[in-house]
């Protein structure tokens, strides 16, 4: 009997330790977020909204690139580059599964027709940057963390290595999926010339902090066609729209005598439409400071001589990397303060509907992680993962468990589509993510660690 009671006590104690290990890192992040919320609250407003915007610019242009460069560079090598191949693949897999779940949510919950693609997008694309980095930093802050001494360096390197795939997906696939629906435009008959398309004002495009947090200065990126449904106009067979639209879109930035315009005369119509879509895709936006830091870190890390020159402690340039490392330490607290500032604004009015909002939250925060656990366990059985590396698997799981990417709010603002809906949905997802992340981190420490 005494043996049974002793074993039961040990079991309860170990379970309690697992729960504490899982929840305490999130409580640390929550504490910083609450401080940001209090400082930005309308009734107190110790720090104005403009200050949070400046802080978000610093995170985007300085703190995050410093963190990525100083931690990805020393960890990356040709061997690791090959061994880590499943990290970017997992981002694509999580997005693909999320798209299927988003489609099911849209079919079951039946949002307004103009928000059908929006529902799929917000379910599919998670935050693979700032939130995972903050969670990894908080988990590894404790000396008795379950991932060992290299917890922080390895975790930040793994998260950083996935950044470039996420950015490419956002500025290509997400950009076009967030295109304003053709239904929000009116065909206006003009006496002289063909019919034109005029936007019906639907959204208040005042940009909340939630929209600009991960893409400061987004208003400078607007182009002539970013707020128009140019893909729908290209491929829609409405009379009087298609041909004139193709000519208008294709003639932007070209002179009549250019070789390109002469060549286009012989192009098949479908090929020409696809080429126009490719030209209007803002792929050049991927070269943002965090992406540049990732590319530099990978390039330097893959060249041993260059890597030792830049990242060795006894290098003559070590004072530079040390300075970058100092600035990198400000990234996580700044990000959580900004998140608190976002939440202080509260949810915006939304036309999405309660049923669809709940459907997206449940699919993104509760259902998708279950598929993620299945994918990780299957990949481990097939020997796709780094053997015995628990942090590697933890980062892979985080790619399925985080709320929708805050960058989606910026894309919504850029496209002039569902800005209020994106803001409201991101607000509620981040509120409920505290509970869902706790649940799945506990599940990870209980199940997956013992499985590995």
Image: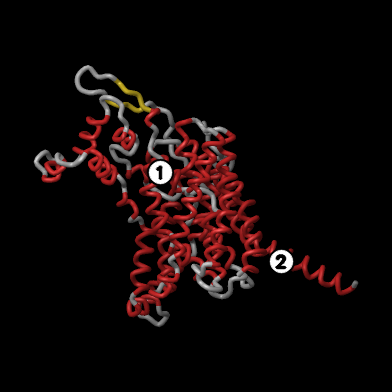
Left or right: 420 in relation to 275: right
Task: State the residue in front, 60 or 435.
Answer: 435
| Number of disc labels | 2
Q: Which mark is residue 17?
A: 2
Q: Which mark is residue 411?
A: 1
Q: Within 10 angstroms of label 1, few (less than 14), some, or many (20 or more) residues?
A: many
The quarter of the image holding the C terminus is bottom right
Left or right: 34 in relation to 178: right
Q: Secondary structure at mark 1?
A: helix
**Which badge, 1 or 2, comes first in the chain's sequence?**
2
Q: Within 10 angstroms of label 2, few (less than 14), some, or many (20 or more) residues?
A: few
Q: Residue visible at 58% across and 55% down?
A: 32
List x then y, in percent, for residue 216.
40, 48
Task: State the residue in front, 312 or 124.
Answer: 124
When the figure is inspected, residue 216 is found, relative to residue 139, above or below; the finding is above
Residue lying at the far bottom in this picture: please name it.
Answer: 314
Q: CA distance from mark 1 to mark 2?
A: 41 Å
Left or right: 69 in relation to 140: left
List x then y, in percent, for residue 289.
36, 58
The quarter of the image holding the N terminus is bottom right
* Residue 226 figure quarter: top left
């Amino acid at each position: 009997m005494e043996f049974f009671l002793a074993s039961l006590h040990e079991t309860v104690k170990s379970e309690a330790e697992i729960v504490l290990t899982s929840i305490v890192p999130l409580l640390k992040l929550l504490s910083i977020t609450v401080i940001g919320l209090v400082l930005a609250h309308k009734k107190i407003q110790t720090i104005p909204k403009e200050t949070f915007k400046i802080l978000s610019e610093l995170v985007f242009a300085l703190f995050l690139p410093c963190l990525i460069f100083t931690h990805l560079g020393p960890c990356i090598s040709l061997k690791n580059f090959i061994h880590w191949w499943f990290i970017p693949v997992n981002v694509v897999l999580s997005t693909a599964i999320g798209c299927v779940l988003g489609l099911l949510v849209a079919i079951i919950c039946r949002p307004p027709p103009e928000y059908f693609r929006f529902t799929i997008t917000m379910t599919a694309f998670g935050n693979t940057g700032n939130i995972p980095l903050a969670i990894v930093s908080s988990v590894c802050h404790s000396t008795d963390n379950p991932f060992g001494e290299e917890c922080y360096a390895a975790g930040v390197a793994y998260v950083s290595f996935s950044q470039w795939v996420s950015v490419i997906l956002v500025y290509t696939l997400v950009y076009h999926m967030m295109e304003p629906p053709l239904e929000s435009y009116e065909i206006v008959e003009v006496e002289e010339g063909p019919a034109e398309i005029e936007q019906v004002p639907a959204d208040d495009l005042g940009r909340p902090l939630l929209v600009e947090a991960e893409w400061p200065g987004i208003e400078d990126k607007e182009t002539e066609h970013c707020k128009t449904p140019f893909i729908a106009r290209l491929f829609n067979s409405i009379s009087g729209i298609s041909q004139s639209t193709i000519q208008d879109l294709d003639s932007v930035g070209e002179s009549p005598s250019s070789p390109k315009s002469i060549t286009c005369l012989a192009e098949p119509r479908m090929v020409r439409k696809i080429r126009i879509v490719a030209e209007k895709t803002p792929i050049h936006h991927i070269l943002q400071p965090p992406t540049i830091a990732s590319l530099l870190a990978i390039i330097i890390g893959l060249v041993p001589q260059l890597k030792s020159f830049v990242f060795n402690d006894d290098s003559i340039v070590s004072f530079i990397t040390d300075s970058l490392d100092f600035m990198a330490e400000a990234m996580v607290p700044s990000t959580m303060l900004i998140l608190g500032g976002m939440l202080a604004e509260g949810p915006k009015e939304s036309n999405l509907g309660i049923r669809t909002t709940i459907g997206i939250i449940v699919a993104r925060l509760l259902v998708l992680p279950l598929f993620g656990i299945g994918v990780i366990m299957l990949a481990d059985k097939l020997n796709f993962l780094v053997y015995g590396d628990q942090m590697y698997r933890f980062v892979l799981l985080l790619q399925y468990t985080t709320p929708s990417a805050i960058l989606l709010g910026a894309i919504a603002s850029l496209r002039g589509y569902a800005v209020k809906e994106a803001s409201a949905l991101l607000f509620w997802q981040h509120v409920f993510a505290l509970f869902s992340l706790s649940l799945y981190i506990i599940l990870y420490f209980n199940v997956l660690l013992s499985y590995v």
